[in-house]
Image: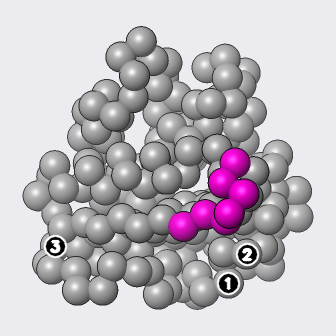
Amino acid sequence: MRKQIRLSGSGGQGVITAAIIYAEAAVAEGKEAVQSQSYGPEARGGASKSEVIIDDGPIYHPHVKTPDVVLAMTQKAADKYYGDLHEDGILVLDTDLVPEPPAFKNIVRVPITKIAIEQVGKSLFANIVALGVLTKIIGLVDLETVKTAVSHRVPPHTIEANMKALQLGYDAVK
């Protein structure tokens, strides 16, 4: 049941936080999980990625080789990080921030940042909208478990907005 997931975007979009939350939720359900991250020296605004591997058994190599799912929150991230996506994998793109989708057969386009701004009030919540999208697409970790992990990771005064963002992302996937 091994799943390899890559979340990518620009520094400051929160893809690392989203990956950490997803890995914590998987562990809370008794699964094995590892999470790793990398970002350019520019940090904010530079390319960043975070990877999660989830499995029923031990994970001996903590780096994603052939992702099953790649989330790209920017055009630069899509161009840079989708190349080794499994041929039957799923490429998840932020509709407005990736105007030129790579040539790949399984693409899910969701206006992630637009949902965060228009329905939650700030682009700051785009990573949690994306987490909701991934939770639905991957189908490996229960939404309620992800909600609990989110509530443990975000500032207390933002829990309600983050719960809304998570649900909106989950519901945005048809």
Q: Which residue is at 16% across, 49% downward?
A: 28
Dot 1 corresponds to which residue?
Answer: 83
Q: How far apart are marks 1 and 2 (CA)?
A: 7 Å
Which residue type carries mark 1? Gly
Q: Quadrant of residue 102?
A: bottom right
x, y percent for residue 81: 66, 74
Which residue type carries mark 3? Asp
Which residue type carries mark 2? Lys
Q: Local crowd at mark 2 within 10 Å, few (<14), some, or many (≥20)?
A: some
The numbered dot on residue 80 is: 2
SS class of the residue under badge 2?
helix
- The kind of secondary structure the magenta stretch mainly shows is loop
* Screen quadrant of the N terminus: bottom left
Q: How is the protein colored in the picture? A: one colour
x, y percent for residue 77: 72, 65
Q: Which residue is at 18% across, 56% downward?
A: 27
Relative depth, front residue between 20 and 112:
20
Above or below — where is 79 with respect to 87? above
Relative depth, front residue between 130 and 39:
39
Above or below — where is 147 with respect to 163? below
Magenta residues, as a range?
A: 38-44
Q: Is residue 158 magenta?
A: no
Dot 3 corresponds to which residue?
Answer: 56
Left or right of 118 on screen, residue 137: left
Please report contact status of discs 2 and 3: CB closer than 8 Å, yes or no: no
x, y percent for residue 130: 55, 45
Left or right of 28 on screen, residue 133: right
Q: Local crowd at mark 3 within 10 Å, few (<14), some, or many (≥20)?
A: few
Q: Which residue is at 58% across, 81% downward?
A: 85
SS class of the residue under badge 3?
loop
